[in-house]
Image: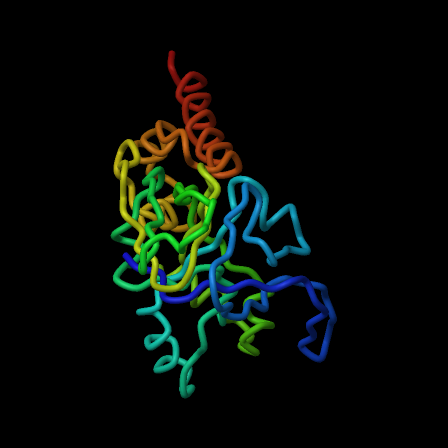
Amino acid sequence: MRIHSVNVGLPQEISDGKRTIVSGIYKMPVGGRVMARRLNLEGDGQADLESHGGEQRAIYAYPWVHFQHWARQMGRDGFPPGAFGENLTLDDVTEQDVCIGDRYRVVPGGGTPEGSAAGEAVLEVTQPRPPCYKLEMRLAAPGFAKTFLRSGRVGFYLRVIEEGEIGAGDEMERIAEGPEQMSVRQISELMYFHKDNLADAERALRIPALSPGWRDTFRQRVGAAEGEGKETTP
């Protein structure tokens, strides 16, 4: 897959006419190259650090192919890169193509810039995106979070394994496959729509890269089922 656009933005006040909050969901494309650091991209920031950012959610990626879908669905002319709060807008990929635990090396599209000391970044897929009301405020689309989630077009978060520069036009080459090969879409549907699927919950727990919060939820489901089984056994 290829990086279509790199987008960053610092927290700012946003309002839907009923409430005003501070959020970093407004991302704008940047020219040149940006350092991918352990906690985020340089020049980027999050306001709600419990739900966004941090080592497990350092970078949010979203497929460019979905932009046309949402423009049609919402009756709009189109959306610019960064419109869904993503740091990386990606070509040639969907949530079904990427698995939790997959690792990617970012290879400069035009070769490593002369004089650059930064190495190639290595990124690891950690979880799908759980949409929230902030996306609705950003797009001025009340109720959109549920539509977004049901569609499966949620994008995914990345952890920075090795820091390095990234830029539009770079290729992301998969260098390792996550264990169990559970796709981003599969994990998202397991979390929200297939809560009784304990077999896949156990598979998800065998993926070390899966974010701790998601692991805790799946662990609780499996543990609760095991507890019920013990109680009903004569």
Which residue does the image show at 46% across and 25% down from the upper left?
Answer: 223
Which residue does the image show at 54% across and 70% down from the upper left?
Answer: 28
The part of the image, by quadrant, that contains residue 229 is top left
Scheme by which the image is coloured: rainbow
- Image label count: 0
234 or 50: which is nearer to us?
50
Q: Is residue 187 left or right of residue 140?
A: left
The part of the image, by quadrant, that contains residue 182 is top left
19 or 98: which is nearer to us?
98
Residue 66 lies, in percent from the top left, at: 34, 69
Tell me if residue 155 comes above or below residue 198 in the rendering. Answer: below
The quarter of the image holding the C terminus is: top left
Farthest residue toward the top? 234
43 or 219: which is nearer to us?
43
Residue 39 lies, in percent from the top left, at: 57, 44
Tell me if residue 188 comes above or below residue 27 in the rendering. Answer: above
Residue 102 lies, in percent from the top left, at: 32, 40
Residue 72 lies, in percent from the top left, at: 34, 82
135 or 42: which is nearer to us?
42
The part of the image, by quadrant, that contains residue 4 is bottom left
The quarter of the image holding the N terminus is: bottom left
